[in-house]
Image (cartoon, rainbow, N blue to C red):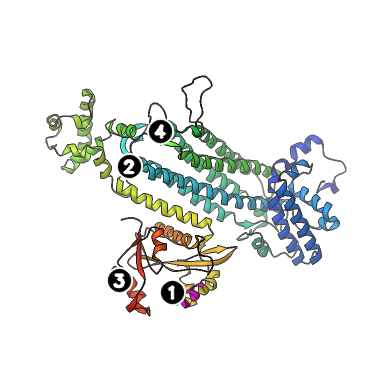
Amino acid sequence: MSMWGGRFAAPSAEVFTRFNDSLPFDYVLAPYEIVASKAWSKSLQGAGIINADECQQLLQGLDELAEELKQTADLPVRDRAEDIHSWIEAELQDKLGAVGRKLHTGRSRNDLVATDLRLWLKAEYQALQASLISCINALIQFAKRHQATVMPGYTHLQRAQPVLLAHWALAYVEMLERDHMRLQAAVLHMDQSPLGCGALAGTGLDIDREALAQEMGFQSACENSLDAVSDRDFVVECLSVASLSMVHLSRLCEDVVFYASGEAGFFLLGDAISSGSSLMPQKKNPDVFELVRGKSGRVAGHLQAMLMTLKGLPLAYNKDLQEDKEALFDGVSQWKNSLDIITYSLAHIEVDSNATAEAAKRGYSNATDLADYLVSKGVPFRDAHEQSGKLVLQAIDKGVSLEQLPLAQMQQINPVIAEDVYPVLEVEAGLQARNALGGTSRQQVKQALVRAETQLNAQKAELKQVRQARLSDVDAIYELITYWTGKGEHLPRPKADIMQAIHTFAVVEVENKVVGCAALYVYGTGLAEIRSLGLKPGLEGRGLGAAIVHFLLGQARDLHINRVIVLTRAAEFFRRLGFKDADKSRWPEKVMKDCELCPRKHNCDESGLEFYLYTD
């Protein structure tokens, strides 16, 4: 059934229909079309266009259709409708008759498809965030397993300086963490509803578009109807984040392919993630990593195609925009599948630590350490660089390593070189020398792992619906604090104080209701405290309290706060989260601010614990 046939005297040609219709791929939007249609039905009733009984019939019919689609997701594809909008409207008319013909009052396929696509992407973003977090976690676990392993670091694919294998893995953690932040930003940028903007000029009905947006779970409504129906920035941004993340995965895959090659021999890929050759029996191929590397070009291609589609489009809607869906659907699918397979595969990589250690010693990768040694003796760096290079050349001529050169030969280049040069040239000494923040020393890598896990736990907390508090949460936070104050667990806090400090609070939601809170209070000395932690009674044991703490530790990490403290009667809970017992008398900030006000100050039964993010 056509939604626009009245103006036409003859039917469309079959060849045009096959080229024009989008139902074969946009049918996946059906659940979101139903969400939008239910919200629109309620708005039609609110505007007085349909009565309560008609609204109820529409809602019931849409619910029945949703159940049918749950059983058979590709049900629309079996029909000959033009698109998912006309299919659902036709199905409703079959169920409800004339009432079904009222649903499309005041709306257009232009604002409807833009709404459906945003709703689809909002749902996909949750799955993408989970896949990103899982991949980050797999890299962190890989780093922890190989924290002691030394390998050569490369520039220009030439051995450069020794690094820890964990340091290599954590480099990709950093990349994927940035991808996660970009994804979060993309969610915020597209969280507005186009519904109610009509074909291009807005609806002629008395529709409360902000209430309509809230009904569908959007933060707000789009504010310009021309932009709303033709905007596909959110598609471009998603494909942009996906493309960059796929580039990061591709770089990781290139490293793994090289490290698993016979030339390097660092990695051994498990049978579960490898394939063989149809001709050469000895072959074990890294197909997983080559495929992900190849798929990065496919996703980037979708981005370029979408940019070119939008480049010359005038306002407002044009049929060119139908090209957005297949690119977006496939780009998101390839990105998620790639993240998931890398997550799985990292657990099936064995590392030959002897081979990596031997390789780290070769290639004169300690030449920089020799130059640094000369600098420590007062030699200008440019001279030290040249002298170290000359000694490398002599070692190459002799076929020995730098540390195998006799001292007398070294002293011919510079007499300041003494016996103490040999310990400096050891691989371990070179590692430990790189002890500045971000370096590959064992201490720095250990601290980097703590920060990475802290960030990971904060990201997991967001999946549990932990978020930054808003002013609208003040009443719920006040209720929680007042309850636990009555139990003797918190100091009382006036509502005005909570409002003033709302930016310090995080909350956790269950079924869109605030059920827990805590605050990260930063003292003037830079010390931070997690305080006012509390959940609604009966919600213990679900990980909600831990999620709030992890979220706040993530904020502390972002603020470069070194130490976070707690004063609590639930010490074991915080110990499980990585906090260590501490002497609370060393916290003069806390003693001066709160302890003097506490009725139990002379008989305190709380334990002090602390968490270090940058030093241990």
Q: Residue tagged by mark 2?
A: 148
197 vs 376, left or right, is right
**Which quadrant of the structure image shows residue 43?**
bottom right
Q: Of the residues under marks 1 and 3, which one precedes in the sequence?
A: 1
How far is mark 4 from mark 3, CA to CA? Answer: 51 Å
Q: Residue tagged by mark 4?
A: 267
Amino acid carrying label 1: it is: His
How far is mark 1 from mark 2, CA to CA? Answer: 44 Å
Q: Residue tagged by mark 3?
A: 588
Mark 1 surroundings: few (<14), some (14-19) or many (≥20) residues within 10 A: some
For the record, the magenta segment spans 480-488
Amino acid carrying label 3: it is: Pro
Check the image and name the residue furthest to the top. Answer: 279
Q: Secondary structure at mark 4?
A: strand
**Image location of residue 16, percent across then percent down:** 78, 37
- When the figure is inspected, residue 63 is found, relative to residue 12, above or below; the finding is below
Amino acid carrying label 4: it is: Phe
Mark 2 and mark 3 residues within 8 Å of each other at the beta carbon: no
**Image location of residue 596, percent across then percent down:** 34, 78
Q: Of the residues under marks 1 and 2, which one precedes in the sequence?
A: 2
Circle nearer the viewer, 4 or 3: 4
Mark 4 surroundings: few (<14), some (14-19) or many (≥20) residues within 10 A: many
**How many numbered badges does the structure rendering display?**
4
Q: Is residue 200 visible?
A: no
How far is mark 1 from mark 3, CA to CA? Answer: 19 Å
- When the figure is inspected, residue 224 is found, relative to residue 444, above or below; the finding is below
Q: Nearer the viewer, residue 418 or 95?
A: 95
- When the figure is inspected, residue 386 is found, relative to residue 91, above or below; the finding is above
Q: Of the residues under marks 4 and 3, which one precedes in the sequence?
A: 4
Q: Of the residues under marks 2 and 3, which one precedes in the sequence?
A: 2
Q: Residue tagged by mark 1?
A: 490
